[in-house]
Image (cartoon, coloured by chain):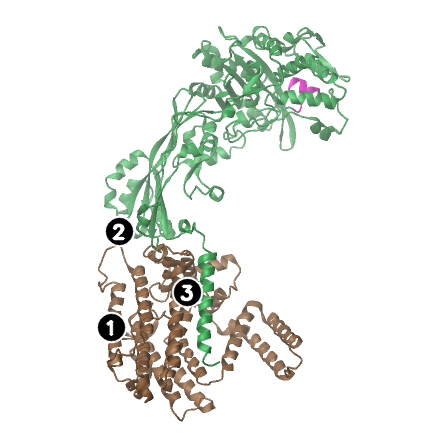
Chain colours: A brown, B green
Amino acid sequence: MSGRGPFGRLDWISVILYALLVFIGWLNIYSTSVGDADTSIFDFSTLYGKQLFFMGVAFLGIIFVLFVESNFFERFSSIFYVVSIILLLGLFVFGKTIAGATSWYDLGFFNLQPSELAKVTTSLALAKFLSDIQTDIRTGKHQIYALIIILLPAILILPQPDPGSSLIYFSLFFVLFREGFPIYYLGILIFAVVLFATTLMFGTVWVSIGLIILTLLVYTFKKASVKIPLLPVLGVIVVSILFSLSVNFVFENVFEQRHRDRFALWLSLEKDEDKLDEIRKTIGYNTYQSEKAIESGGFTGKGFLEGTRTKGDFVPEQHTDYIFSSVGEEWGFLGTATVILLFSLFFLRLIYIAERQKSDFSRMYGYGVISILVFHYFINIGMVIGLLPTIGVPLPFFSYGGSGLIFFTMLLFIFLKLDSNRLKDGI
Amino acid sequence: MKKLLLSSVIVLIGFTFIGRLSYLQLFRFSPDQILDDPAIKKVYDYPERGYIYDRDGKLLVGNQPAYDVMVIPREVKPLDTLEFCGLLGIEKGEFLSKMEKARVYSPRLPSVLVPQLSKEDYAKLQEKMRHYNGFYIQKRSLRYYNTKSAANVLGYISEVNEWDLKNNPYYVAGELKGRTGIEQQYEEILRGQKGVKHIQKDRFNRDIGPYKEGKLDTLPQQGKEIHITLDKTLQEYGEKLMHGKRGGIVAIEPKSGEILAMISGPTYDPALLVGRERSKNYSKLHYDTISKPTWDRSILAQPSPGSPFKTLNALIGLQEGVINEDTKIRCYHGFYVGNTLRGCHCGGGVRDLNSGIYQSCNAYFAGVFRKIFDKYNTTDKGMDVWEKHMKSFGLGGYLGTDLPTGAPGRIPDVAYYDKWYGDGRWAASTIISNSIGQGEIAATPLQLANMTAAIANRGYFYTPHIIKSIGNNGKIDPKYTEPNYTTIDRKHFDPVIEGMANVYNYGTARWVKIPGIDIAGKTGTVENYIRIDGERMQLTDHSVFVAFAPVENPQIALAVYIENGYYGSRYAGHIASLLIEKYIKGEITRTDLEKRMLEKTLEHEYAKPYSGEPFKINEYVW
């Protein structure tokens, strides 16, 4: 039996996919930050050199996680959670401000971002709470408790301000859905988002007409045997129209101009070519440049280190949030599709692993890990390729940054460690 | 369901991303994007513009260096402004405002601070330049003119405008382009091909090295030199003779169609449109709407040709067989149209072809014109035949010369008069003025010179052109080396040419004979009217003269048109004879005449209609 030692039953497929993503990410960081002067890749004054150092730290983190007893994480999850909440609160007093966001502790050699740590601890805490024998997610009280665990860090992070990280915590709802939280909540949310977007694009009148026509179509083409009660349907329509009416009000009065501009850009609300040009130069500059960079890559890309826009630093934040644009430019469609494929395979593999857990805690924690990673991936790439409005979150394993890489790695390897011990737990 | 939710979401996201990426990278991608890439700067290496020589290899247009003082505002260190301004030769206020302008344009990119320094200023500045950080001198090439003549023929170069940029992808803002004349016509030959270097730059537009190690870069291709058909000496001499006179002169070598001189008066020194004063000078020339120096009268003015046209009517009469050399027509000091007598200056009496031409008898040619029309059953048919003959001389349409501008002139046709008078409501007698070159006919001096060349060649002409050879091998467009035949048989030309030669021997130009050279010519005196402030007034007649020489083996054919020069031989005839003598003999024997022509001006005539006072026309004032 090869289960001896800390590496024994590690899921090597996941580890290899992880390593591949980190390696490809580093190559692109190298490309975005390499200068003309030939320096060693171990030059820690450069971004790629630093990232290499962070990769080393992350590796130490992996070793640490693998050598720790696996029930250590379950046992102390509540304490971890409380500590991270305290750290988040502490930011209001001791926080260091970088680029306008007070999200860091200055540890001298390293800036610690507790919101990254909190992603790990919140996942652990949520899994711990849900796996408790006494917890029943179908009861309202426990639903509220679960919501508090998820939303507390999100609320603390929001005023840093870091709406992107804050939003990430909502991904943990997928854990709840997996454990029996009613899925129609998700349906309502999606319906609301669609209503919001369509109202901005077409106006309340057309949205209302559309809803009514849709309803009529459903009634016309449904089988005679299927009965749909009329009153609740009418109720839904009325509520939807009221919601749609409120959208314009909220958009005009609650949102600020920069938010409106982002939505205008996202939904192509602005048709005036001059104003569009203005938006491209200001609020939409990042998105515009990043789309252009990706477009210019074509099918095969310009080649490694040949991305002219990447070299020219045309896309802001291209080594962090916009790293994917340099994949698009230098590696083309082949590269971007490969990365999408790797991520998808990686996530599906993790789901497969989560589902094979015998311990509820491991499965729930696994779902938390996957949800967080998927959400980052979805929001980040969606933003870089112009499908989503600009929300600053890093691409896991890819983007430059120590806290990100280290905590994503910890997040993942705690799960892989739990998985490697699944047979022992079963006994 | 709940187990599949997250997996389905992942797959859905994957497909959405791949879809969006294929849209961006496959559908929206176009391969030439590499050249539009804002991260690649193209730096151009401009070849020297080709030189222009005259027919004998004398330099007309070359290049001279000019020096722009450039500034990169960010790199400027505190400096002694007063001393620097002194070196540059500008005021401190101007210096500061230009620096501010450059800074607003871009603190990181070079702007022109002082354009086109003279050689002297450059020499002074050059050694001190290294003391001033952020400034440097950039050399560029300007046109240098080795003549003060032929401004309109040579044309000028100027910065490309929005229209050029939109219509020709070759040009980049700030480049120079031939704007008129030869500079425009032979732009692509003269300018060559610029070389391109691709430079990788960052988002602040700073250079960060060559793009792909210069694999896409090209070397500049030198512009070719061209030789044009002008005779520098003749052109310069002609412009001197045009001093103080308005009008156009075109001289052509009949046996090749090469344009020897193309003179428009008044003209200007081509060097005015080069250098720092360029735009000031240009406005001055361009907005002179009365004497219009930039309007090339030799190819754009379209006056009625007057009596030189009689020679063509004679040729058509002979070709149609309605007259022969001996056909006699009586002149009653004029001729009748209906009951009105139209005047004639020939002195009256019986005229035949020869005396009709050399005495320029209006009555004789009115008779010939009628006979041409009488040959045919209908006026329309007669008109068509007449028009066809006329157009075979290159009249009433663009000649197809290699000059970027031109005017078609006019030979009226059936449709023209049907529109004017109504169908069937006009006849030969209605349009009889055309017989003597007045009426509805219009022709440019170039067309008149070409028509004269066709007579000199006894029946054909080469399309007039200005290009003699390009580069070293010298091939030019074959359309300029193929003869265009007129509809008149060769045998009919001899009697007409005899009449034209007698113009000098006995006729209207007997005072302007050149000793030792046989000339055939024809005078013209053209009545003209203008409208000033809505009032139509008659001005002194235009003086027109066409000639070729020598009569046997012609070397030069020319047309001279002098606005308000009174009768044909008075100005036009004299100038034509001087030009012929200069071209054939290389020197002038009649120095009195030359002196008179060089000194006389017609400014007093041109001032008359604008004086606001009543004035006399056609005064005999020498």
* Chain identity of mark 3: A
Q: Secondary structure at mark 1?
A: helix
Amino acid carrying label 3: it is Val
**Left or right position of B464 against B201:** right
Q: Which mark is residue A347?
A: none
* Chain identity of mark 1: A
Q: Against B344, is B422 above or below?
A: below
* Chain identity of mark 2: B
**Left or right position of B455 against B155:** right
Q: Which mark is residue A384?
A: 3
- At label 3, counting other C-alpha atoms closer than 10 Å, the crowd grade (few under 14, some 14-19, many 20 or more) is many
The residue range painted magenta reads: B432-440
Residue A165 visible in the current orientation: no
Q: Position of residue B470 (x, y in %)?
A: 42, 27
Amino acid carrying label 1: it is Val
Please name the residue that numbered disc 1 is placed on.
A57
Q: Looking at the image, which is closer to me, B273 or B457?
A: B457
Name the front one of labels 1 and 3: 1
Most extreme residue toward the bottom, as rendered?
A: A134
Q: Position of residue B218 (x, y in %)?
A: 35, 41
Q: Which mark is residue B78?
A: 2
